Image: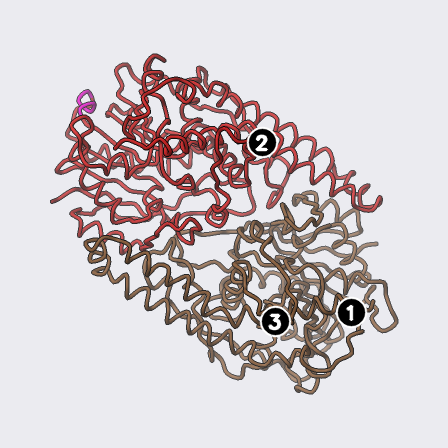
Chain colours: A red, B brown
């Protein structure tokens, strides 16, 4: 379905605003930290002296330095936005699916403007990092690209902070345990489903990972030898995905400080100021001939569209892996119908996640259907899945492992095969 | 310190607004649930039929019924607001401390208008139930009592939902484990500190519980035989405290549905719709001659004020128990100085809690000093405490035990004795 000129303008404006948010991170975060400094100077001299003896002012200075290191990294991500297509001439009437061949020559990137046409409500994100997301999503806004420079909102900055934490989850040694607990069982289930297939033939089987975030699960699946496609909606994930997958040439070549933004619930300074090195593996080191791609855009628009000869989806996928994804649905019935329809007969859907319905209590007038786990499974059976290997997996999701406040998701895991 | 007429007017207006929030709970919560019903009818007929087969519409009807049960309870709490003094003639020039003798004859209640003069920023609350609190506190507002009827905000309703969950923590069988994990070690430490004192002499020792919430820890301490005073700031805690302590005459005489407000992260309907009976004990059943009181108002104003002959505080307390309280400080130095000053020589401060600094990122222009645990302890030593029995206690705080998202605080515990 082609986009209207006004939709394309809106999309370009949103993209420009996200770039601005990345660029404005440093002044925004430094201002927040400087407020603490101002608060300090409102205290009595005696109180200031006591706190100074504890090293409070030096702590604020260290936070400033960590923020500047984060800014260096975030600015690199958006240093050349023209490679994403918005500054180059392109056919604006293309469909919603823009495929990015990953770890290939740059010619392909220019040929397929990346993330150009992802479309929809921009609050639609798969982040599970902060429950507060839902209550603040009314801050999301879109400005015209020709209007005065966009001023990033608290909501935008919360997204950026989530991006930094997502790097820990997907591309750091620190995130290894979290990945082993969540991605591990999903990959095991995939290998189990295709256990009769020799490794060298896995490339004949197509695996889709909707809500692929920074891309690690999809990359891992490609690394196992399957043909794998990630799909992601948020520019706050897509821009960093591109950077880490295509512009990073050494292990642990970047350092970020994902925990510097909150001074709450900390046992000590190290819990806040510890650096995280990324990446833990070389993203470009996929085996020769790997088939790995990322597609930018809305899951329902891309995979739920009527089949066209150029973009057939029905029955085209041998496996769909949803990790912390299905609760991004406004209407879960539609999500499950699409997953069922695009799977080949006997194809497998592997799910792990909670049900933090992203549109519950939304202020954007979107509908929201909110089922519990029993209902989701009953719905899946009605739609034509046979569910097995049901269990609960306790797992974290991007939180600071050294915080005094621990979040643990009792996430639902299952494999489901298409039966009808 | 007497209050100005405008401060008294503001306080009366705030009190009236809280009463209105209690009264408006039903229409507010029913409207939120009805939105789900409207969303349902936007779906295709086929999707509606599928969801109807799962019992989705019946689930919405059950949520309505649970909300109405909650409303019955909340309306009882504010059925007679005049007993709190705002509708009766009283001396408006009294000091900030308004003592409420608990479980005594009503004559005393009328003589000491309860919660009349609690004062300060109304967002100052000790609730740890939702991290989102901090991001939404700019919704707090105060209207004039003679203006048109106050329209409760999302922030007000979040407070009410927290109140219902707090009842589970403090006054239900369901909350027993949480109390044993958190209040248990604090009471043990208190008994240990006074182990040389015969039980019948405990009434000579005065224990203060700042941030007493719905009053259970303070009540438990009084039940052990100590003279105990709770102090609480929030009307959302004070009104229900009064109701449960003075207007409840049978165990499990009330039923609430604290988990009906969110449809997210639920394994099944029972996790959302299960009733909680309160209270688990008879609050009026304190031993004959117990000395138990609650004081409404701001901790720093009441206990940090210059000593007056009528209200001496310095050195007047033998123990101070802070449970999930110290992070409500704007300036933790002042909190610790006050605790130190009001303790008698050799007195004990027993602490349990995280450091979710309530004023971090506030939008009310309040200062906020945010230390980590190491710094808080170092500060306490500088101020004149000797710290012992330091350990970490893993504990929940009012969350739905059946949710797929579990929060666990790795809370800091210590006892500290006043040395200088």
Between B410 and B402, the one lying in front of the other is B402
Which residue is tagged 1?
A: B5
Q: Residues within 10 Å of mark 1 (few under 14, many from 20)?
A: few
Quickly name the residue at label 3: B220
Q: Nearer the viewer, mark 2 or mark 1?
A: 1
Q: Nearer the viewer, mark 3 or mark 1?
A: 1
CA distance for labels 3 and 2: 42 Å
x, y (%) of residue A106? 36, 13
Is B142 displayed left or right of A314 in the figure?
Answer: right
Residue B415: where, in percent of width, then height? 69, 56
The chain letter for the residue carrying disc 2 is A
Separation of marks 3 and 1 at Cα, in angstroms = 38 Å
Callout in the foreground (3, 2): 2
Q: As rendered, which of A397 and A152 lies closer to the eye?
A: A152
- Name the outermost residue toward the right: B309
Among the 4 quarters of the image, the one containing residue A236: top left
Q: Which residue is mark 2?
A: A274
Q: Quadrant of the N terminus of chain A?
A: top left
- Dot 1 falls on which chain? B
Relative horizontal placement of residue B155, taking residue A206 as reference (left or right): right
Element marked by disc 2: loop
Task: Report the residue at 61% width, 66% height from top.
Answer: B213
What residue span does the magenta drawing correspond to? A200-204
Mark 2 to mark 1: distance in Å?
51 Å
Q: Nearer the viewer, residue B190 or B213?
A: B213
Q: Pointer 3 indicates a residue of which chain?
A: B
Q: Quadrant of the C terminus of chain A?
A: top left
Q: Is residue A49 above or below residue A359?
A: above
């Amino acid at each position: 379905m082609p986009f209207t000129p006004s939709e394309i303008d809106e999309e370009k404006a949103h993209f420009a605003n996200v770039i601005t948010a990345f660029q404005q991170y440093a002044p925004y975060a430094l201002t927040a930290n400087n407020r603490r400094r101002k608060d300090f100077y409102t205290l009595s001299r005696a109180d200031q002296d006591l706190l100074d003896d504890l090293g409070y002012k030096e702590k604020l200075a260290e936070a400033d330095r960590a923020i500047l290191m984060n800014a260096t990294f975030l600015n690199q991500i958006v240093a050349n936005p023209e490679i994403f297509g918005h500054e180059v001439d392109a056919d604006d009437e293309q469909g919603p699916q823009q495929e990015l061949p990953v770890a290939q020559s740059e010619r392909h990137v220019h040929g397929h403007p990346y993330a150009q046409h992802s479309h929809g409500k921009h609050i639609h994100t798969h982040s599970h990092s902060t429950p507060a997301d839902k209550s603040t999503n009314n801050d999301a806004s879109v400005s015209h690209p020709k209007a005065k420079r966009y001023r990033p909102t608290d909501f935008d900055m919360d997204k950026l902070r989530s991006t930094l934490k997502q790097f820990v989850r997907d591309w750091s040694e620190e995130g290894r345990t979290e990945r082993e607990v969540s991605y591990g069982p999903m990959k095991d289930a995939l290998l189990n489903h295709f256990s009769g297939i020799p490794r060298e033939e896995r490339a004949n089987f197509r695996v889709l990972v909707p809500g692929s975030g920074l891309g690690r699960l999809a990359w891992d699946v490609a690394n196992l030898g399957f043909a794998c496609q990630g799909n992601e909606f948020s520019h706050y994930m897509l821009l960093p995905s591109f950077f880490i997958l295509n512009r990073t040439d050494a292990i642990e070549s970047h350092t970020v400080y994902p925990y510097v933004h909150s001074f709450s619930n900390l046992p000590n300074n190290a819990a806040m100021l510890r650096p995280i090195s990324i990446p833990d593996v070389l993203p470009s080191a996929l085996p020769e001939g790997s088939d790995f791609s990322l597609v930018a855009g809305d899951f329902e628009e891309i995979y739920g569209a009527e089949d066209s000869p150029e973009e057939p989806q029905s029955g085209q996928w041998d496996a769909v892996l949803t990790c912390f994804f299905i609760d991004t649905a406004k209407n879960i019935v539609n999500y499950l119908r699409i997953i069922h329809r695009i799977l080949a007969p006997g194809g497998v859907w592997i799910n792990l996640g909670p049900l933090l319905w992203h549109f519950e209590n939304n202020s954007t007038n979107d509908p929201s259907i909110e089922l519990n786990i029993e209902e989701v499974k009953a719905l899946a059976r009605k739609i034509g899945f046979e569910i097995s290997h049901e269990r609960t997996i306790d797992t974290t999701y991007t939180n600071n492992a050294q915080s005094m406040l621990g979040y643990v998701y009792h996430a639902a895991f299952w494999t489901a095969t298409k039966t009808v």
